[in-house]
Image (spheres, grey):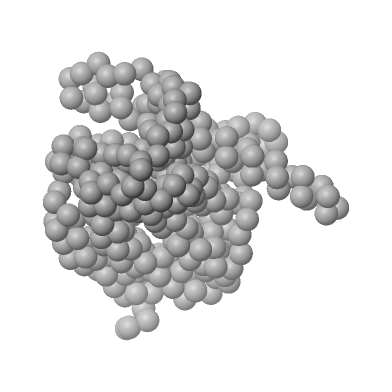
Amino acid sequence: MPLVTEIVLTVGGILAVTVFAIVVGLLYLGIDRKITAHMQARIGPPVTQPFTDVAKLLTKESIVPGDSIPLLFNMAPLIALAGGIAILFYLPIGGFPPLLGGSGDLVLVMYLLTVPALAMVAGGFASGSPYATVGAQREMVTMMAYELPIAIIVIAIAWRLAVAGVALPFALTTIAANPLWGVLGPLGIVGFAILLLVLLLVTPAEVSRIPFDTPEAETELAGGLLVEYSGRNLALFQIAHGVRTIAISALVVALFFPYAIAPVLGIGGIAAGIADTLFFLAKLFAVMFVSISLIRVAAARLRITQVVSFYWTYLGGLGILGLALIVLDAGVLL
């Protein structure tokens, strides 16, 4: 393929993924609010409310506090949004392969997941507000807490593929082509299911949702990290929030459910692309419903000390148990 054509296709793909992430992210936020409202016996706002909120905020003035660091304060929302979108460039979406990728893109994605959170921390510290400073400190502690379970999951998947003789085990295209459910025996499937549960419980903390929303904690910190943000900057943070939700959910789908439905239906061409995209969206919304909507309705906010204990002790232990079962299933220790 000529270089110019390849560049045009890549740029077109980047624009398409960016639009997809923003639209689907805001749509999910609306669906989430509607579903949780009905689960709490309320009517709730319309599904399109996040689009209305963002459009209204974009017309408002962005107020910069006098005690802030203006450059860092204004750059933080942009970095958070860019970081979330960049993750999706390395993940397969629908029946389409990732736009970017290589032998170690799973490790890269793991680090890219921290970029939006770090941007929010930087924005919180740069705002000069005591509420935002406390929220930034809590965000850093939460981020350090859930990194351990994520690292265990990444290591377990890549190690098992490597033992099975699969080349490039850290590449997401490799994982998509070799779903681990088909490689494992009964013991390993139990361990892999445990790792899925762990990642589903990491997801709400990754997007700062109840019960892990201590960095924002509206009743304690009046919004925490975002208390000083308004106008365009707050709109960008809201968009970034939706994109982060899509990114972490797409990662769950890529690691645990990398299946297409077109081969099952025996269709090809454009129909296959549409069917796989719709199937991908169904998997994405199912993951978001279970890991975010259901959990935030069923649980109350945890204290920051409880968040750390939950991830380091309970989910860290569960992750190690899942890893141990996968190792035993491979017969390496027998």
Q: Determine whether, in the image, residue 274 is placed left or right of residue 311.
A: right
- For the C terminus, give its image quadrant: bottom left
Q: How far across and down, in percent of the image, does residue 154 sit? A: 41, 65
Residue that lies at the very extreme toward the right in this rendered image: 2
Label tally: 0
- Along the line of sight, which residue is nearer the eye, 238 or 20? 238
Q: Determine whether, in the image, residue 36 is placed left or right of residue 23.
A: left
Where 102 falls versus 328 (above or below)? Answer: above
Where 38 falls versus 182 (above or below)? Answer: above
Residue located 31% across and 49% down the image: 128
Residue located 44% across and 47% down the image: 70
Residue located 14% across and 56% down the image: 306
Residue 129 in view, yes or no: yes
Residue 247 in view, yes or no: no
Q: Determine whether, in the image, residue 110 is placed left or right of residue 96.
A: left
- Along the line of sight, which residue is nearer the eye, 22 or 230? 230
Q: Determine whether, in the image, residue 231 is placed left or right of residue 104.
A: left
- Along the line of sight, which residue is nearer the eye, 120 or 296? 120
